[in-house]
Image: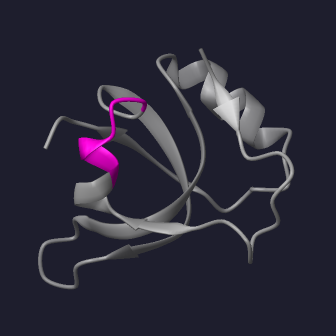
Amino acid sequence: MAWMFQTQTETETEKLSWHAMCCRDDLKGRWVALDQCRYDEHTGCALEGAVVDSDDNLAELCQRISESPWKGCAILFCDAA
């Protein structure tokens, strides 16, 4: 089941740490689209971002993001923490 923060604007979407995202049951094992994603300078791993959408199917997520105002999102797989 896919979901999207359709009513929130870029400035209203809450940023979460990568660890917090991976602990959420609704995001574990799914592809997540992150706005304002921040990465560790040394490892290149995601540190935080604002989740704007998620899906089990990468192609469907990419399709929705391409049709949304969230064009500059990072799309990452959320493994269990």
How many numbered marks are there?
0
From this view, report whether residue 21 is shown above or below residue 79.
below
**Residue 23 location in percent, x, y?**
24, 44
**Residue 5 location in percent, x, y?**
73, 47
Within the image, what quadrant is residue 50 found in? bottom right
Magenta region includes residue 24? yes
From this view, report whether residue 53 is shown above or below residue 11.
above
The residue shown at (40%, 34%) is 27
> Is the N terminus in the top left, top right, bottom left or bottom right quadrant?
top right
Left or right of 8 on screen, residue 31: left
Left or right of 56 on screen, residue 10: right
The coloring applied to the image is one colour
Within the image, what quadrant is residue 20 found in? bottom left
Left or right of 21 on screen, residue 40: left
Within the image, what quadrant is residue 26 found in? top left
Q: Nearer the viewer, residue 5 or 40?
A: 5
Magenta region includes residue 17? no
Q: Nearer the viewer, residue 36 or 25?
A: 25
From this view, report whether residue 26 is shown above or below residue 7.
above
The range drawn in magenta is: 21-26
Q: Nearer the viewer, residue 13 or 43?
A: 13
**Residue 72 location in percent, x, y?**
67, 62
As drawn, the residue found furthest toward the bottom would be 41
The residue shown at (37%, 69%) is 48
The residue shown at (51%, 16%) is 57
> Is the C terminus in the top left, top right, bottom left or bottom right quadrant?
top left
From this view, report whether residue 67 is shown above or below residue 29.
below
**Residue 21 location in percent, x, y?**
34, 50
